[in-house]
Image (spheres, rainbow, N blue to C red):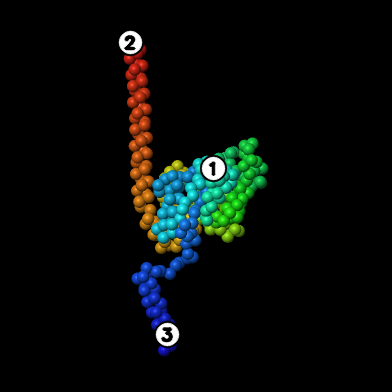
Amino acid sequence: MKRTPASAFLRSTFTAAALAVLGIMPRASAEIAVKNGDKIAFLGDSITQGGWGNPAGYVRLVIAGLEANSVKAEPVPAGISGHKSDQMLARLEKDVLSKKPQWMTLSCGVNDVWHGKRGVPLDDATAKAGEYDEKVAERGTYKKNITAIIEKAAAAGAKPVILTATVIKEELDNAENALLAPYNDFLRALAKEKHLPLADLNAMFQERIKKENKPGTKVLTSDGVHMNGEGNKLMAIGVLQALGLNAAELEKAKASWAPLEAAAAEAAKIAAEARAAAEKAKADAKAKADAEKAKAIAQ
């Protein structure tokens, strides 16, 4: 019997339904790139350091999101507060390559701009035209430093995943974000040239901040730069997408984050109570010292 288009459609529908019952759904994208047992190094600055130090930081969310999709990866935290591209390049071997990871995410750029005169110029032309301190030549340029990091990592067998730098304060039209823009343009071009996964976090942040439209309110950061809960989740989503998770897998990842967010809330509560206790102890000690001083004067 010759198959008609209608019968072919019914057959395909039945097949899809059967697969759904079995829990097997056709993928909307390529397979997850990370495999069981892979190590992922997270190279970056304080944003990445917090991404690991915070129980619900983006690094931990990425690892949990992969595990929720049956991929157990080993994290290699390599974020250090205040670091710029030259410092990351200098410690690349020690903090990343010596651990022999299969993957390396690179989050770098905010401090290169934010540090002003102590920052890292985009290129030689920027170095000559900009106002930098006397050590600018020692720091090199962002383009050279980032390219060296990427090439060294790839040569050592660690596939780089490039993350565009997020934002410097949530006023998107400020001078610092304008200075940051060509750094991110370079990262996008480099990812395309080297055929590397790209998590365009800056674009994601800009879209979210514009959509929320809450001037004067911190939507994704705690201080304009470092992530709050929403910022960490958005970063994790961007990284997981770059690693190949499709929409359904992202939903599974998000569903796994609740315990981590609860742990983060509890940790924040304990830290706040500790700060309050320390402040009270300090105030009590001062009051006691003042009383003793007054008593001594009275005598």
Q: Secondary structure at mark 2?
A: loop
The residue under the point 41% across, 63% down is: 248
- Mark nearer the N terminus (3 vs 2): 3
Q: Quadrant of residue 297?
A: top left
Please report the residue visible at 46 percent of the width from the left and 55 percent of the height from the top. Answer: 73
Residue 14 in the image, given as x and y percentages of width and height: 37, 77
Around disc 2, counting alpha carbons within 10 Å, would you say few (fewer than 14), some (14 to 19), or many (20 or more)? few
Q: Considering the numbered disc 1 on the image, is that residue within a helix, a strand or a loop?
A: loop
Q: Is residue 34 above or below residue 214?
A: below
Residue 122: % across, % down: 61, 47
Question: Front-most of 91 and 178?
Answer: 91
Residue 251, picture quadrant: bottom left
Q: Amino acid at mark 3?
A: Thr
The residue carrying mark 2 is 299
The residue indicated by pointer 1 is: 83
Task: Name the residue carrying label 3.
Answer: 4
Q: Residues within 10 Å of mark 3 (few under 14, many from 20)?
A: few
